[in-house]
Every structure is written in structure tokens, then in C-alpha cells.
Image: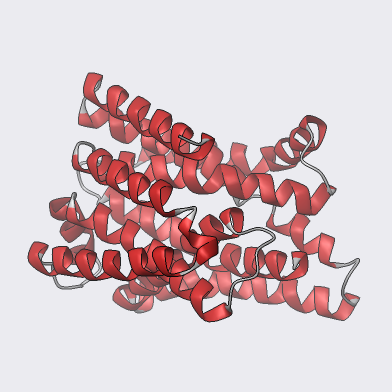
Amino acid sequence: MNKIIKSRISIILTSLIVSYFISDVYENILGFILILSIGVIHGANDLLIINRYSTKESNKNQILFFFYYLMIVIIGFALFYIIPSLALLAFIAVSVYHFGEQHWEVNLAGTNLSSKIKLSLIISHGLAFFIIIFMNNLVPVNEVLASFYISSLNYSLLALSLFLVSILYCFLLAYNKILRNHFISEISFFVLLFILTLNSTLIYGFAIYFIFFHSLLSIKDQVKFIYNDDKPTSIKKYIRSSMPYFILALTFLLIFYFFVDLQKVNLLQIIFTFLAAITFPHVLVIEKMYSHKK
């Protein structure tokens, strides 16, 4: 059993044990804390990454990229007020790609796969994650979808979709020599993820994947790109530069807690709107970061 499989088993089993001993309310609180701490930190240094481009691109291109970044944030928020259903679907589609990209950029570093196979892997991974978490949290998911004026999902349709995506994913892993080494780790990961999301809340299950299987890996890649290494001193610099955004997130959380009646608002709707608005530009930055690393 390799280190990747061992670490995944350890993280998910620990998460399951924690969820067993705490109530749904505390699962959600823990999930929010993870998202608003490590999750926010992992996307807080986008501007540092953009500044790093200045050594490789002209000042004009850098200014344009800053402008595009701000415009995407504004458009993201606006879409959720003007066309909420389209905005949520766009967020899910972008997240499918982003999560899959991060996963396979880490696993396939230094390999030479065709762009078609790599794209298929990225999309299949992201789809499998979202289908699993939607299937196992169908009631709260449909509540969120209803708040964005989107029709409810059907469990049977999700199950069929997961079956088809799993067949494609397994075929891709088994077909290519490079990918065969990842077959057992990938299948075991999704089986464990299914068990976790089946026995936890939507926010908690999402947070465990988002933090331990996405954000921390992304932070490592970002530190390497910004500082040319991932030594403890560089990680400390990265965290220090993230602190203003982290403090801002905590301030937002406290204001929200004290001034908003949680009984009268759809908390999940607000959380997904917030995540989407900051995810749209972040995905563009990370995509550009990986293109510079190649």
C-alpha cells in the first residue's frame, strides 16, 4: 500500500470518526471553519501569483490580467443577483474542472499524456466528486437548487450518471500505462469518499475534500511557483501574506453571526454564492499558473 492510499485512508477514516462523535450542527460548524480558514487562505494569494507573472510577461499583460480578475469577481456577484440559476450551474461546471485539474496536475507532474486524455481525466474526476456528494446529500442539495430556481435532482438519474462516469474513469485509468499505477488509489479514494459523504452533512463532506484533497495541495503548488521552493520559510511567508484575507473572512463570519437571523436565511445559498464569486477568478489564475510551469 503506497503513501497516497495510506494518507487518504487516514484522512477519511479520521473524518468519519469525528463525524460519528459530533452532531450535524457541529459538523457544519467545523466545515465552515475549514472553508473560511484554509479554504480562504488557498485562494488569498492570487495577486501574488499574478505578480509572479511580471517576470515572464509584459507590464501591459499584467495590468490586463488584474483588470480581468476584478471584472470576473464583479460579474460573478452580479450573475447571482441577475441570473442565479445560470450562475450556480457555471460555478459547478468551473469547480468540476478546477478540482479535477488540481488533482491530476499533482498526480501527473512530469508525465507526458495527450491533452484529450488529460482533459477527460480532469472532467471525470470532478464529475464523480460532485455526483457522489449530491447523491448522498440529496435533500439539502435540492433545497439549495430550489433557492437558485433550479429543478430538483433525481437520485436514480444521479446513480446512472455516476455509473457511466465511473466506467469512463476506470477505462481511462486501465487503458493508459502511465495511469494504471493510479488505478487502485483512485478507486479506493472514491469508495472512501462515498462512505464519508453518505455519513456526514453536505458542508462537512464538501469541506473535507475541499481542504485535504484540494486546498492543501494547491497551496503547495502555489508556494513552489511564487517562491521557487516549498520550504517551511516559504510556507510561512505564504501564510503571512494571506492573513489580511483570513482576518477579513473571520470578520465577515462574526458580522454574519451577530447581525443575520439564521432562521430566516438560506445559509447554504449564501455560502455557495460567496464561494462562487471568489472561485471564478481563482480558477483563471491557477490555470495560468500551471501553464507557466509547463
Q: How many marks?
A: 0
Residue at image position (29%, 29%) is 16
User: In front: 74, or 93?
Assistant: 93
Residue at image position (45%, 68%) is 121
Question: Looking at the rendering, in which quadrant would you find the C terminus?
Answer: bottom right
Residue at image position (32%, 49%) is 190
- Quadrant in the rendering for residue 274: bottom left
x and y percentages locating residue 71 in the rendered image = 61, 75
Does any portion of residue 77 appear in the rendered image?
A: no
User: In front: 14, or 40?
Assistant: 14
x and y percentages locating residue 12 in the rendered image = 36, 34
207 vs 268: above or below: above
Does any portion of residue 271 appear in the rendered image?
A: yes
User: In front: 180, or 191?
Assistant: 180
| Residue extending farthest top | 21
- Which coloring applies here? secondary structure
Question: Looking at the rendering, in which quadrant would you find the N terminus?
Answer: top left
| Residue extending farthest front | 177
Q: Is residue 100 left or right of residue 114?
A: left
Residue at image position (38%, 73%) is 87
Q: Is residue 34 left or right of residue 288?
A: left
x and y percentages locating residue 103 in the rendered image = 52, 55
- Quadrant in the rendering for residue 290: bottom right
x and y percentages locating residue 165 in the rendered image = 28, 68
Q: Is residue 262 left or right of residue 189?
A: left
144 vs 198: above or below: below
User: In front: 277, or 102?
Assistant: 102
